[in-house]
Amino acid sequence: MSSFIGKSLLSNTVLSDVVNATKVDSLSTANSLDVYKFTLGGASSVNVAVKGFSKNINLALVQDKDGNNAIEAGEILRESSNADLMTEFVNASRLESGTYYLAISLGGGIYSNGGNSSHDEL
């Protein structure tokens, strides 16, 4: 089962421009989940790489289909949870217009991460 199940989407950072966006942030045991919210205006592909961290993290592309602000089974469209990799990727094509979330979590420790994302209109 995904480690993202049951996590809240309420505390999120809105990404107003997701085309080639770069975001720098940090995670810690006190702040073990970062959520970024973005909206696609039309059918699109989304490609996200999160890199520049010193320990393993997990990355998920989520669509809150029932609008309850919690991640549930069936709402995780793509997930990357590769152990010991320096970069996590999620790629999704043919996404419909709508609101999506990128969730980034860690297991422990304090370290910084940077991310790059892009989307292409179909």
Image: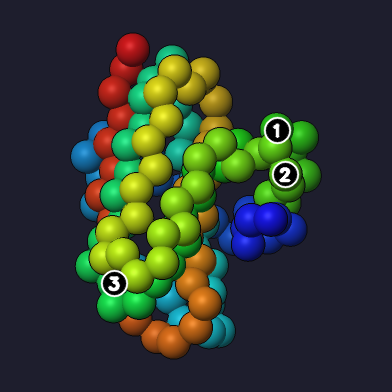
Q: Is residue 84 above or below residue 6?
A: below
Q: Which of marks 2 and 1 is nearer the N terminus?
A: 1
Circle 1 residue = 65
Name the residue at 48% across, 22% down: 95
User: Please, is residue 80 above or below residue 105 in the view?
Assistant: above
Residue 20 spot, x, y in % from top left? 22, 39
Query: Residue 59: percent from the left, percent from the top?
Result: 46, 55
Label 2 to label 1: alpha-carbon separation: 11 Å
Who is closer to the viewer here, 107 or 30?
107
Secondary-structure class at tag 3: loop
The residue at which mark 3 appears reads as: 53
Residue position marked by numbered label 2 in the rendering: 73
Q: In which quarter of the image is the N terminus?
A: bottom right
* Residue sitting at the far top: 122
Task: Provide the secondary structure element on which disc 2 rests.
Answer: loop
Left or right of 34? Residue 86 is left
User: Going 31% across and 30% down the picture, which residue do you hit?
Assistant: 119
